[in-house]
Amino acid sequence: ERAYERKAFSRAEDTIGTELLAEMEAQAQQDAATRARVELRASEAEESVAEEMAEQRDAFRDELAELRKALRRELAGVRDEQGGVARREIRLENRIERMKADYQECQSELQEVTSKSEKAQEEFARDRSALLEEHDHYLKQLRKEHGVQQEAAATELAGIQGRHEALQVRHSDVAEGRLPAAEAQLSEFRVRWEEAEAALVDEPDRRKVERRTMVQRLRVLEQEEGVAAQHREEIEELLFEQLRRTESGEQAARDSLHQVRNERIADRQRQDKQLERFRARIQTLEQSESVLEKQRDSAERIRASLERGGGRNVEEFARQVDGFRKEARAARAAEEEMRNEIKRRQQSTRGQELQEARAAATGLADKLRTAEDRCRELDAARLAAVMAEHTWQNEHQLLEARASRASITSEDSAKSSKSRDQGQELSRRLLEVESKAAQEAREESQEEAALLR
């Protein structure tokens, strides 16, 4: 019975061993098929993610190129406008200087003419006062001479009357017989009377001539004064006309300066709008960077799931990491170009806007450093995944060797069941990762479409 039991036990042990070997082989085949499916799905997911990331990188590069071109065009336009405004300001300043010089020259001429006119008026007043004094002195002298002449005429008339009385006496004498002598005296008297009358007649004529001469001289002086006043009025009119022209020129210069100020204000507003557009572009870049971060997070989740499952493509992961590094370098180049653009625009923008641009550039640099740190973490995770994959392969090979030797124990069976559970968990997580990746891809495409709109 004991021999029979031993034979039965050995026969049952052989049967169980063969069944377990068959089960282990089937499980190994199933695990291999599952791993192949997981690797295939992972490679497909990685290819799709790589294609999407390549498309996004191309779109990002195209957008950066368009942004560079637009920035260069806008900067060239701003430089041309600033050059035109500067040239216009220089022309206006030169014109204002010329107008100021003309105005000063007109003022100096006006002062000179005014001083000359005042001097002429003073000279005319002195000449007129001198002529009036001379005329008064001459009238006084004439009156004095006329009084003397009247006194002489009165004395002469008294002498003539005495002589007439004497003649009457002589006439009586002549009537008495002395006629020839009386006639001679009478003729002499008549001659003297005529001379006296002629002298009395010539004196008023001479005075009239002198008065007429004085009146003519006064009229000539008044005419000269009128001509001088007319000349002075003409000079004043010319100076006032030149002053009005200068004032109109100054008004035109003020209008030009006001126009230049308005143009400067418009330029500042346009530059503010350009800076707002730059900020919007920077925000778009940050949003695209956040999208890239989401993609990196999804890639990290896929990598983590692949690390936990053990099946993944290390080379493709390395290419993704290289792609991330290239994107980081492109973003760094874009950041450097943006800094250069900000430096070039530093002379025409306000300090607060420059500080905001610098803060945005600093934030972008911090994000780039964060991306580089993440790339380094990805490298470390890749190495850890490689080590974990080697460890998993070694354990799997050890289990296969133990199964081939048919030395199955309870611990080995537990490890086999654990490996089977890990394969099932890996397939389930891979399906979840694929569904999440598809959902994230749809969300990212929707966000990109919204950003593009």
Image (cartoon, rainbow, N blue to C red):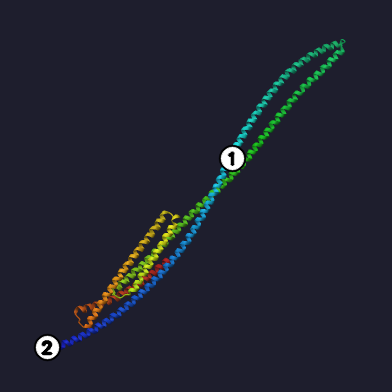
In the displayed structure, does residue 71 sit left or right of residue 237?
A: left
**2 or 1: tag closer to the N-terminus:** 2
Give the residue furthest to the left. Answer: 1
Number of marks drawn: 2
Residue 430: where, in percent of width, then height? 31, 75
Write down the residue under mark 2. Answer: 2
Q: Residue at horizontal 41%, vertical 56%?
A: 354
Q: Is residue 92 above or below residue 306?
A: above
Which residue: 41% across, 71% down? 55
Q: Is residue 241 left or right of residue 183?
A: left
- CB of mark 2 within 8 Å of CB of mark 1? no
Residue density around tag 2, few if under 14, some if 14–19, many if 20 or more, within 10 Å:
few
Task: Residue type at mark 1: give it.
Answer: Leu
Does residue 4 appear in this view?
A: yes
Q: Quadrant of the C terminus?
A: bottom left
Residue 110, disc? 1
Residue 279 visible here: no
Q: Nearer the viewer, residue 165 or 195?
A: 195
Q: Nearer the viewer, residue 443 or 261?
A: 261
Q: For the residue carrying disc 1, how many other residues have a C-alpha within 10 Å: few (<14), some (14-19), or many (20+)?
A: some
Question: Secondary structure under badge 1?
Answer: helix
Which of the 4 image quadrants contains residue 402? bottom left
Residue 212 sits in quarter: top right
Asked which quadrant contains residue 338, the reply is: bottom left
Amino acid residing under circle 2: Arg
Across and down, in percent, residue 330 comes to 40, 66
